[in-house]
Image (spheres, grey):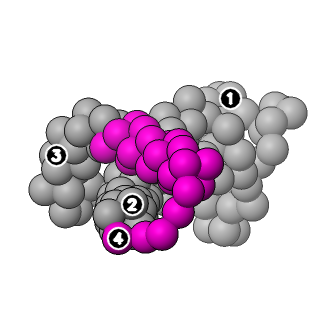
């Protein structure tokens, strides 16, 4: 695989990862907010003893810490997420560039050379139409004289 294709693939993966991570975190933050509300209401109006109260506080703390971790990550990802969200065609442009790189790479792999004068070369030679072969033969005969 060429370096150019690797770079384009890496850029595409990075752009997708930024969007996917930000969206995943955002969704989980909303779910954790709802879970926090559930725990707050249980603490506020629920019936429980001190042992269950301690477990509720520990669970409340775990949910809040998980939410904080996701929120902090999204706070820093937000700059990239917003920047790339404003670049509407960037991802499609990268897919187009990757396609162009693939076409050029395929061409390079199947590359053939048509010798202009010499026919004793060992490189793969493309079959030429008969009129071009005749012109080459006449040219070679002129050069021999």
Residue appearing at x 69%, y 68% in the figure: 130
Q: Position of residue 24 (x, y in %)?
A: 43, 59
Q: Is residue 123 left or right of residue 111?
A: right
SS of the residue at dot 4?
A: helix
Query: Label 1 neighbourhood size at 10 Å, few (<14), some (14-19), many (20+)?
Result: few
Mark pair 4, 2: CA separation: 6 Å
Q: Which picture quadrant has residue 29?
A: bottom left
**Does the residue at mark 2 contact the one at mark 1 (Cβ under 8 Å)?**
no
Residue at left offset 86%, top offset 33%: 122
Q: Main secondary structure of the magenta part?
A: helix
Q: Camera-side residue: 140 or 84?
A: 84
Residue 45's mark?
A: 4
**Disc nearest the viewer among 1 and 4:** 4
The mark found on residue 43 in the picture is: 2
Residue 98 rendering spot, x and y as whole percentages: 47, 53
The secondary structure type at the circle numbered 2 is helix
Q: Is residue 90 left or right of residue 32?
A: left
As measured in the structure, the alpha-carbon distance from the residue carrying label 2 to the one carrying label 1 is 103 Å
């Amino acid at each position: 695989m060429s370096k150019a294709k690797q770079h384009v693939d890496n850029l595409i993966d990075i752009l997708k990862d930024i969007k996917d991570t930000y969206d995943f975190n955002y969704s989980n933050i909303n779910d954790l907010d709802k879970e926090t509300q559930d725990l707050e209401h249980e603490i506020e109006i629920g019936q429980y003893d001190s042992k269950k109260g301690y477990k509720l506080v520990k669970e409340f703390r775990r949910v809040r810490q998980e939410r904080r971790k996701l929120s902090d990550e999204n706070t820093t990802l937000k700059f990239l997420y917003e920047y790339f969200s404003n670049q509407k065609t960037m991802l499609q442009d990268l897919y187009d560039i990757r396609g162009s790189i693939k076409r050029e790479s395929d061409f390079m792999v199947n590359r053939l050379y048509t010798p202009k004068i010499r026919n004793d070369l060992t490189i793969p030679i493309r079959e030429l139409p008969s009129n071009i072969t005749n012109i080459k033969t006449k040219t070679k005969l002129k050069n021999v004289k």
